[in-house]
Amino acid sequence: MLYHLFQYLDQNFDIPGTGLFNFLSVRTGFAFITALLIATVFGKKIIHILQKKQIGETVRDLNLEGQLSKKGTPTMGGLIIILSILVPLLLFMDLTNIYTILMLIAVIWMGAIGFLDDYIKVFKKNKEGLSGRFKIVGQVGLGLIVGLTMWLSPDIVIRENIEMLCTESNQIEVLAQNVKSTKSTIPFLKDNNLDYAGTFGWLGDNAQFFGWILFVLVAIFIVTAVSNGANLTDGLDGLATGSSAIMGVTLGILAYVSGNINHAGFLNIMYIPGSGELLIFAGCLVGAAIGFLWYNSYPAQVFMGDTGSLMLGGVIAVFAIAIRKELLIPILCGVFLVESLSVIFQVGYFKFTKKRYGEGRRVFKMTPLHHHFQKPGDGSIQAIFQAPKMPIPESKIVIRFWIIGMILAAIAVITLKIR
């Protein structure tokens, strides 16, 4: 809203300083600071309301280090993150930009699903929360909206590996044109664009249609997988919050270079007109996450609950899809991926060994993976990976996961040139 107001003032009254809002860097800075301040200033008031309503965490005794001390800690703190993202988004982003609209839908959509899940757990006293199939329906619904919007919106176009020519006057001329395309970025490959439609080249004129169908299915899978991965990662104080902030910074960098014609040309990567606006959303996301860490860091004064974790995973997935970097997800969201895989392997191996040997065996002492490091190695649990014998303090586990996330984020960025 402020963006449109200042743009109007600049165009019609030429008031000094109003032109600053035309710069992405300025609006990103304002968005980051605003999100950070809202989370820290209003976060305390929201926590007080949650405590007053007795919206506390129910804890089962799983013999984990420091677990029982979390009992009664307010949950549904994801409302703080959602508020801290939405306000600067509405204030500083171009509300006519299709990418802004996509991210706005993603925040509200996934936040509503997570809120409903937490509401059932807290107020209906049903520890199972929202049925898994309804969560999946919601996640698939968002993936479908994103995929179809990318397909049908005339505002979503690309210029593949733009060619640039310096004339005598040092002006840059772009030789490529905007096109609708099913192409995405493949990390580490020199010819680093994948065309989903190329999979169906044998269908001739119908290849593009089926390429978009495949793209929509990939979008659905990624939104579902990443949002569930973030949900599983939210088990230690600050783990999902800090990891999301790291991913937000990385996505902001990728959005900036992809949406800037000069940087895209220099890096010889896909130029995506209008996607630079997502840099401001990255500022909203990172500011909200860091502000929430003020209260969510160990020992946590509030938990984000599914309200926050499902939303964070969902918006990270939509962001990556929007800038055609969805194939970087296994690297960028490696922490979420490993947490999800640990659960899949644990459940699969347990069922296999129970059927074959009559007794279920484990890969890890406990999953998701972060709980494996909290579980004492007393020999009472038979698992393939028993180390460590002594539980690692929660804060140390979180920081080590953050460090791993930073390494993966750096790898994701350097894939722009290492290919």
Image (cartoon, helix red, strand yellow):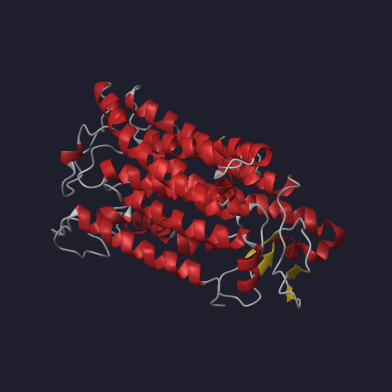
> What residue do we see at 77% from left, 58% from top?
179
Residue 225 visible within the image = no
Residue 311, given in percent of the width and then of the height, sits at 46, 41
Q: Nearer the viewer, residue 283 or 161?
A: 283
The quarter of the displayed image where residue 97 is located: top right
Horizontally, is 91 left or right of 410 in the view? right
Q: Residue furthest right?
A: 205
Residue 83, given in percent of the width and then of the height, sits at 43, 34
> What residue do we see at 32% from left, 29% from top?
46
> What residue do we see at 41% from left, 36% from top?
307
* Quadrant holding the C terminus: bottom right
The quarter of the displayed image where residue 6 is located: top right
Residue 49, given in percent of the width and then of the height, sits at 29, 24
> What residue do we see at 31% from left, 39% from top?
40
Q: Is residue 306 above or below residue 391?
A: above
Residue 179 visible within the image = yes
Q: Is residue 283 above or below residue 308?
A: below
The quarter of the displayed image where residue 101 is located: top right
Q: Nearer the viewer, residue 395 or 164?
A: 164
Q: Nearer the viewer, residue 254 or 124?
A: 254
Residue 295, given in percent of the width and then of the height, sits at 26, 41
Horizontally, is 215 left or right of 201 in the view? left
Q: Please tell me how many numbered marks the rendered image carries.
A: 0
Q: Is residue 46 above or below residue 10?
A: above
Q: Nearer the viewer, residue 226 or 396?
A: 396
Horizontally, is 194 left or right of 306 in the view? right
* Quadrant holding the N terminus: top right
